[in-house]
Amino acid sequence: MDLMDYIRSSPRTFIIAEIGQNHQGSVATAKELIKVAKDSGADCVKLQKTCAKEKFTKSALSAPYVGPNSWGKTYGEHKDYLEFSADDFLELQAYAKKLDIHLTASAMDEVSLKFLEDIKVPFIKIGSGDSNNLFLIEEAAKSGTPLIISTGMSNMQTIEKIYKLVSKYHKKFALLHCISAYPTPYDSVHLKVIQEMQKKFQDIIIGYSGHELDLHVTVAAVALGAKIIERHITLDKAQKGSDHSCSLEPNELQLLIKQIRDVELALGEPDKEIRKCEHACFEKLGKSLVYSKNLKVGHEIRKQDLKVKVSIPKGFDPLKYEEILGQKLLKDVVEDEAVHVKHHHSL
């Protein structure tokens, strides 16, 4: 069973803790974040893998990059500082395996895609920045490795194009509703897109990658049917870097996952029936049919002879009151006495 089959068949939401580049270029910090994700109950941690010269033009890499979040004088130096080597990835992959949590990465270019395929990650992520990169998406689809594709900065026509392209090769992929704003204002989230994607793409998994502040919108995405949830994580929101402010600190990640698991339990099944936990309340407050007045043996019961009250002991179910009408009493009864089958002919 590949990962997509597992996610599809599991009653549990698959939760990805997105480290991204919040590791600050430190393998040790990345390990801390992997441990946080595992301890919080996440299913997977995700990094980013980039070959800078494949993703960026020479002019983009040589552009000055100054500011509070910069790790270098140029954008190229900044990206190099935050990029893990192949050996770093293998070390982190081995660490995650030891902790029994999945580890993968977003492939930011075709060189990085090949690397991730070679180290056999459980799935490859295609980020929103590449939602219009049909070259990369097709190469990823050809590999046969399961894919999770974010759809930020895309309209439905683009998403349909992605769906058709990947479907030419396999159905082992998921689409995540996503808005690429950090943080995302609540009025820009549009969670109803999840339901629309579920209708349009019924044979694949639909999930949600959130960049909003707080937790409740992500929990609502689960209630709407998102089978995969992705949120950024950090050790400290105040750390240097543009993603930290809309990332979850360890206590928030733990609380989010608890809330998601609670909602999964609460969603339950679509069949409505009296649940075991309601029995005590029914015994205390559940209504019964009672007689509205004193009545003599042989009296033919009319609707005005009946009332519905809490009764001890319980009597006849008020939902079935029509079965009582027209029946003759076999005994005298008094006001407020609970109605019982044994009181009537033909019941």
Image (cartoon, helix red, strand yellow):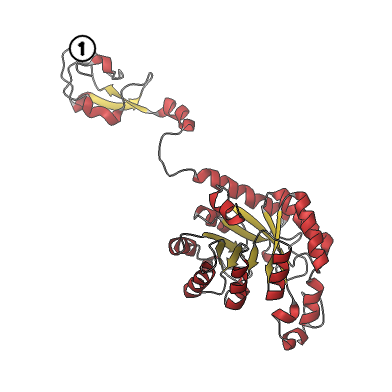
Tell me residue 83's x, y (percent). Answer: 78, 71
Q: Can residue 70 be spotted in the picture?
A: no
Q: In this rendering, is residue 29 above or below 240?
A: above
Place residue 211 in its image quadrant.
bottom right
Q: In this rendering, is residue 126 above or below 31?
A: below
Task: Determine whether, in the image, residue 268 is placed left or right of residue 74.
Answer: left
For label 1, the residue is: 330
Neighbor class of circle 1 (other Cα within 10 Å; few <14, some 14-19, many 20+) is some
Amino acid on which disc 1 is placed: Leu
- Foreground residue among 332 and 329: 329
- Which residue is outermost to the bottom? 59
Q: In this rendering, is residue 53 above or below 42?
A: below
Task: Determine whether, in the image, residue 307 is placed left or right of residue 24.
Answer: left
- Foreground residue among 171 and 48: 171
Q: Can residue 4 be spotted in the picture?
A: yes
Helix, strand or loop under label 1? loop
Tell me residue 204's x, y (percent). Answer: 51, 60
- Foreground residue among 160 and 110: 110
Q: Residue at x 63, y 67 (%)?
A: 143
Place residue 328 in its image quadrant.
top left
Q: Residue at x 70, y 50 (%)?
A: 40
Tell me residue 120's x, y (percent). Answer: 71, 61
- Foreground residue among 21 and 285: 21
Q: Residue at x 52, y 72 (%)?
A: 165
